[in-house]
Image: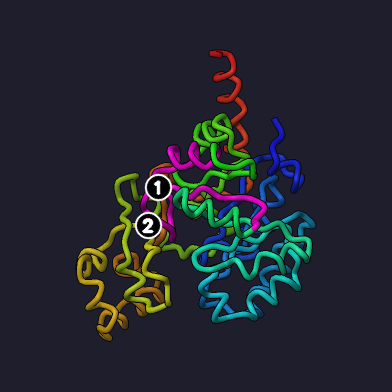
Amino acid sequence: MGTWLTETFGLSVPVVGAPMANVSGGKLTGAISAAGGLGMLGAGSAVSAEWIRTEGAIAAQHGKPYGVGLMAWSVKDHPDHLDAVLELKPALVSLSFGNYSPYVEPLRAAGIVVATQAGTVADAHVAIAAGVDAIVVRGAEAGGHGRNAVATLPLLQAILDLTDLPVLAGGGVSGPRGLAAVLAAGAAGGWIGTAFLTCEEALTPDASRQRLLEADETDTVYGSVFDAASRAGWPAEFGGRALRNTFYDTWEGKEDALKSDDDGHSQYVTATRSADPTSASLYAGQGVGALNSTTTAAEVLEHLASYKTYLRAAADLA
């Protein structure tokens, strides 16, 4: 049951732990890789190049392949982030959200596999032209930033029909049944983030962890309220899927005003520092309802590894 993903990186489970800023530090990244998946360091715009080096070294301690996720719009302003990644030489780098084309060849020349996330077929065309090694289909169900245009399954089918490049599926893949489904469709693996949010190794604060465990699949919302409040610099075309909270409800539809509202910005920053789930952003996908306990990354991977049972059942039906 090997795929391009497992064969390229020597994995026992065809899963990439999606790079999540403020969640996927070196400890979680390394734990996912040690358990048979491919962990990804979430290098957000607010981290330093030294943070990337330090956390990358932690991720590498197990001696297993790992990756780093970068945002193209942020790399433009922080070229030292790319320099740090080139020094680390992780097995995989994900470059998304903005003009990533200038960075593809330098990474590939260093022997690094390059992937990008696509939220539409048009995004996939751009990725192919840029020369990436793999495409991550990011459906609207996915947590964190991206597009809200197309659900995972129709987008996965369309992009698989478009290209012979390896395709990974992200968005709504919350357990072994979902992983089996995307593999059966032709994906090389699952790009999974939400399932790892409450892991012991994650950077997720305790209050946020508890809120995630309480949430169900209807509790997420897609929009740009938190981006307007944070003033981090996210391009307007990419909103984010997160848990709905009081702050979001207060400012929904008033994002333009929020961008210049100092009190709103201050409230958001304070809430983020204190991990107050009523006002801070808590990015998660529609698979959040499947979270019901704090586990280790190894336990999540062990659960996902049972996808083979469902693939065999589908084969028997055929």
The span from disc 2 to disc 1 (Cα, nearest Å) is 8 Å
Question: What x and y, as percent, mark residue 39?
Answer: 64, 55
Q: Residue at point 32% right, 76% down?
A: 229
Residue 237 horizontal side relative to residue 135, left or right? left
Q: Nearer the viewer, residue 140 or 195?
A: 140
The residue at the point 63 percent across, 46 percent down is: 298
- Residue 175 sits inside the magenta stretch: no
Quarter of the image holding residue 283? bottom left
The residue under label 2 is 241
Front residue of this view, candidates 207 and 302: 302
Q: In the image shown, does 50 or 61 lie closer to the viewer?
A: 50
- Tell me which segment is drawn in magenta: 131-160
Is 219 located above or below residue 303 in the figure? below
Residue 77 visible in rendering: yes
Residue 167 spot, x, y in % from top left: 59, 44
Whether residue 299 is visible, yes or no, is: no
Tell how many labels.
2
Q: Earlier in the sequence, mark 2 or mark 1?
A: 1
Check disc 1 and give the amino acid type: Glu
Name, please, the residue furthest toward the top. 317
Query: Disc number at residue 141?
Result: 1
Instruction: Say which quarter of the image contains residue 126.
Output: bottom right
Picture coordinates of residue 274, whole percent (x, y): 39, 74
Placement of 32 over or under 225, stated as above or below: above
Front residue (pair 149, 261): 149
Residue 81 locus on image (x, y percent): 63, 76
Question: Which quadrant is the N terminus positioned in?
Answer: top right
Mark 2 secondary-structure assignment:
strand
Q: Quadrant of residue 36?
A: top right
Task: Tell me, yes or no, whether the two marked residues, 2 and 1, touch with CB atoms within 8 Å.
Answer: yes
Decide whether residue 144 is among the magenta residues: yes
Which residue is depicted at the point 40% across and 56% down? 147
